[in-house]
Image: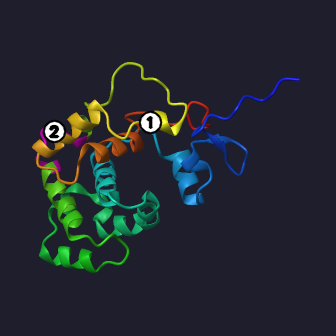
């Protein structure tokens, strides 16, 4: 009789359906599981769709991602479905409306950053999609087996954050840039044995 292989510390764990997932997508609330299984790590393209992800990652800074997930529809309503053109046209009346909106995170600096980022996105030659995806890592990467194998920052995310800041974007440090890269499928950080890999 052979003993079962020991579980990898920080490795995939079975969810309620018995399938192995990244720990954060297996044992947490259903919101996390659905996001893990259907969105996280899936390639995202399109100016407004990437603008939304960039904004939401900035709003998440210092907070739980679950907080953002549960308010995402409120954010979409408040920020005109993250239409770059519409958000760039927001004025002081819109800022006041957003600061009073209980359906979003009411942080003045993050709200101002979202509006400023819409202006920066409009000014980009070649577009936000081309800029962000130009920082996708090339070549093969080591597949993470445990959460400890997943970086918080990479050379690519540092370079992307630096370029976004140079182009006038705010709230886009290397950690936020890497979280967006993970969420938008520029990298695949699902663990090796995860069902979503």
Name the residue beneath numbered marker 1. Answer: 150
Give me the disc on residue 163.
2
Which residue reaches farthest top? 139
Mark closer to the chain start, 2 or 1:
1
Residue 146 image-quadrant placement: top right
Q: Dot 1: within a 10 Å radius of its alpha carbon, few (fewer than 14), some, or many (20 or more) residues?
A: some
Magenta residue span: 121-128
Q: How is the image coloured?
A: rainbow
Residue 177 image-quadrant placement: top left
Front-most of residues 126 and 37? 37
Above/below status of 83 relative to 128: below
Q: Position of residue 50 (x, y in %)?
A: 31, 47
For residue 88, side relative to residue 39 (left or right) = left
Image quarter of the C terminus: top right
Give me the disc on residue 59.
none
Q: CA distance from mark 2 to mark 1?
A: 23 Å
Q: Is residue 50 magenta?
A: no
Residue 55 image-quadrant placement: bottom left
Q: Residue at x 71, y 52 (%)?
A: 16
Instruction: Report the number of numbered marks.
Output: 2
Image quarter of the N terminus: top right
For residue 128, side relative to residue 24 (left or right) = left
């Amino acid at each position: 009789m052979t003993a079962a292989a020991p579980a990898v510390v920080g490795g995939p764990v079975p969810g309620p359906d018995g399938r192995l997932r990244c720990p954060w997508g297996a044992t947490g609330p259903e919101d996390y599981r659905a996001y893990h299984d259907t969105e996280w790590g899936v390639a995202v393209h399109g100016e407004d769709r990437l603008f939304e992800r960039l904004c939401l990652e900035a709003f998440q800074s210092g907070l739980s991602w679950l907080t953002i997930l549960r308010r995402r529809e409120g954010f979409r309503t408040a920020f005109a479905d993250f239409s770059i053109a519409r958000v760039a046209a927001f004025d002081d009346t819109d800022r006041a409306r957003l600061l009073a909106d209980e359906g979003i995170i009411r942080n003045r600096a993050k709200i101002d950053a979202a509006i400023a980022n819409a202006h920066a996105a409009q000014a980009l030659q070649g577009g936000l999609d081309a800029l962000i995806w130009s920082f996708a890592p090339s070549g093969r990467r080591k597949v993470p087996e445990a959460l400890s194998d997943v970086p918080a920052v990479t050379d690519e995310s540092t370079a992307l954050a630096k370029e976004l800041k140079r182009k006038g974007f705010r709230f886009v440090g290397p950690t936020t840039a890497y979280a967006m890269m993970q969420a938008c499928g520029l990298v695949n950080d699902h663990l090796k044995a995860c069902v979503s890999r």
